Amino acid sequence: MVTATGRADSEACVLKVSGDFDSTSVQGVRDSLDAALGEGFRSIVLDLSGVTYMDSSALGFVVWADQRLQPVAGRLALAGANADVARILELTGLIGVAPSIVVSASLAEALSGGVLTYDRSGALWVESFEFAADASRLASARTRLGEIIAPLGLSDSAVFDIKVAVGEALANAVRHGSPRGQSDTVCVEVRAYADRVDIVVSDDGCGYDGAIRPSRDAFAPSGRGVLFMRALMDAVEFCPGIVGGTSVVLAKRRFAPA
């Protein structure tokens, strides 16, 4: 059985699944997720605290949900699963890898832990810099970013995550978002908020929606940058630049959720 609860105050829709999550109930969960998206929700929380049985149909749902959510920049949090159900979820191989799927220990954590849309008004301060789209300048750009975020009091691991994730965005902007090479410019804007920091990387390219293109080659030398961004940051959003190109907004919470 699945019940849906819209939460306009938090911009999330909670879908609670109870009992068996199997071939007889999975279609109802799909329909409920589709209905939530149709109502404008892009943050979905699947409350699994009442699930006592899960089979391969539910694993198929996770794959389907990721494919359904990516094109609309949606996110799904799988919340409150017991130890047995959590172990089954791990068998999908998608947990921690699928861009739109996150796992939370409880419903409360899911609703406060980065699944939701961020309010981008009221920044404490904003600082920006730009550099020519030259790969040799990527290291100095990462160093400059580290200097800007240093006063925020982030943990060493959070700073490392930011440098890696933003480094991937910078590299993509240079390699794929700068058709005129070093004549193009990559812009970086850092916005500090009370609860998080947003880093916006903008390029002069032809645009990119952030969708991950499937590859049959598991040993391909590239194509994993967006996976890194989504895995290391609390939120990643791709949107058109003001005058063309792509702007990638990468958000990292300054404090752990209560």
Image: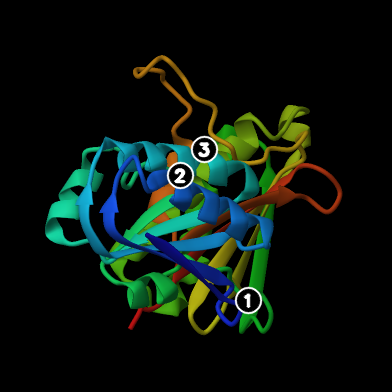
Indicate the position of residue 226 as horizontal and vertical percent values.
49, 40
Indicate the position of residue 102 as horizontal and vertical percent values.
38, 55
Type of amino acid at the residue the image marks with label 2: Gln
Identify the residue under disc 2: 27
Residue at left 21%, top 38%? Answer: 91
Does residue 100 appear anywhere in the picture? no
Residue at left 58%, top 37%? Answer: 211
Identify the residue under disc 1: 119
Identify the residue under disc 3: 67
**Sequence order check, earlier mark of 2 and 1:** 2
Q: Quadrant of residue 180?
A: top right
Question: Which mark is in front, 2 or 1?
Answer: 2
**Sequence order check, earlier mark of 3 and 2:** 2
- Quarter of the image with the N terminus is bottom left
> Is residue 199 depicted above or below 228 in this figure?
below
Query: Mark 2 falls on what kind of element?
Result: helix
